[in-house]
Amino acid sequence: MSAPATGRSLGLLVCLQCRATVRGLQVPYPRCPRCHAHLHQRKPHSLALTAALLLCAAVLYIPANLLPVMYYNTLFEEERDTIMSGVLVLLQSGSWPIALLVFVASIVVPLLKIIALSVVLFSAWRRTPRYRTQRSELFRMVEFIGRWSMLDVYAISLLVALVQIRSLAYVSVGWGALAFGAVVVLTMFAARTFDERLLWETEQ
Amino acid sequence: MAPFSPATRCARCRALLQRPENGSIDTAVAVAICALVLFLLTTAYPFVGIQYNGTSRDTTLVGAALSLYRQDHASLACLVFITTVLSPLLQIAGLLYLLIPLRRGRQAPGMGTVFRLLTQLRPWIFVEVFMLGALVALVRLSAYARLVPGVAIWSCGLLMLALAALTSRTTPGQFWRWVEEYRT
């Protein structure tokens, strides 16, 4: 089977905002006639931007997991909770499905997302011809599940808002939570700046 | 491509290109109004409350973000506020701003730009993730305190469904088809 014709080989541009197909415009900065978005053959600086964002996310993944995300303060003591110790608390209280959910969403998914995006990015950079379909699918899956990592940030925000029994016991936020939120946001941006079509580009 | 196939997929990477869409604009407006009402309920009423040793405390959706702000975590508070309150509101209001004039064959000022911004905003609506996060928080609290679910917890669950329905009914392809259809 011969390779299907691509828009680029036919001189067509697709508007990534409104999905309009536009016949190649020979002007310096083409804009979509329908929604006025800027048109590019490929997302500009896709590989460099994705790599930079991904690197930031990978660095922040370390404090996100090591720093406490939450402090539980009572009159007598202060308990620190990292993401992992939060999972263990849930496990001890007997709600293992919730513990598993938090473990997967907060620890496994961000790590997998960073690894998967690195793999995809690397193969787009090297223009590896093998397993392209699988890589495309991996990328789309990662884009879809990545957002669920944020659930711990919301859980913490509710705990902070609710557990404020004046001077007796209160919950406060740790810097780990911010690092964690940043990892999720950065990987989301990294996935958005990555142009999937670069996975399919062959050596000219 | 096969005209009767349920969805068009890319021949190379099998990504979904297009679903057959011929939804009515009236349904979309109705869903948007429904989502707006649910959003107002969700922000106006307490989300959940706890009772502990005779003291009680509750919080709203905005209160969750505000309590982070009070603890000097403004950036985290912004993240929570934008993803759970601001993005859904802008999405609903923006779509109503575009769709209501469009039904009558008129185009709202700045239509292309507004719709483009709305599609870019969509990944930042985290209402469904917030619901799951709330579940986690409630499970953790249930060991120590009595929980009192508020009105907002139910309306937020419904808002999550309404937003999903709204997003799937106003895909870019569908929106621009309406624009062409209602151009009179």
Image: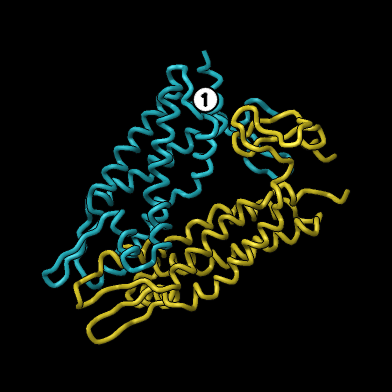
Chain colours: A yellow, B cyan
Spot the residue most to the front: A28
Q: Position of residue A192 (x, y in %)?
A: 60, 51
The residue at which mark 1 appears reads as: B22
User: Farthest residue in the top direction?
Assistant: B184
Question: How many badges with numbers are in the image?
Answer: 1
**Residue B175 placement (x, y as % from top left):** 52, 29
Does residue B104 appear to the left or right of A44 in the view shown? Answer: left
- Residue in the picture at 60% in, 38% down: A17
Q: Is residue B140 above or below residue A31?
A: below
Instruction: Please determine whether, in this image, residue B2 is positioned above or below residue B64.
Output: above
Please say if B51 is above or below A133: below
Return the residue nearer the eye: B8 or A56: A56
- Bin the neighbour count of mark 1 within 10 Å (Cα to Cα): few under 14, some 14-19, many 20 and up: few
**Quadrant housing the N terminus of chain B:** top right
| Quadrant in the rendering for residue A3 | top right
The residue under the point 23% across, 70% down is A164
Query: On the picture, is A79 further left or further right than A152?
Result: left
Q: Picture coordinates of residue B51 (x, y %)?
A: 17, 66
Res. B139 visible in picture = no
Q: Position of residue B96 (x, y in %)?
A: 40, 31
Q: Secondary structure at mark 1?
A: loop
In the image, what residue type sits under mark 1? Asn
Going 37% across and 80% down the picture, which residue do you hit? A80
User: Please, which residue is most extreme toward the bottom here?
Assistant: A76
Quadrant assignment, res B166: top left
Side of B179 where A128 appears, left or right: right
* Chain letter of the residue carrying label 1: B
Q: Residue at x 39, y 28 (%)?
A: B29
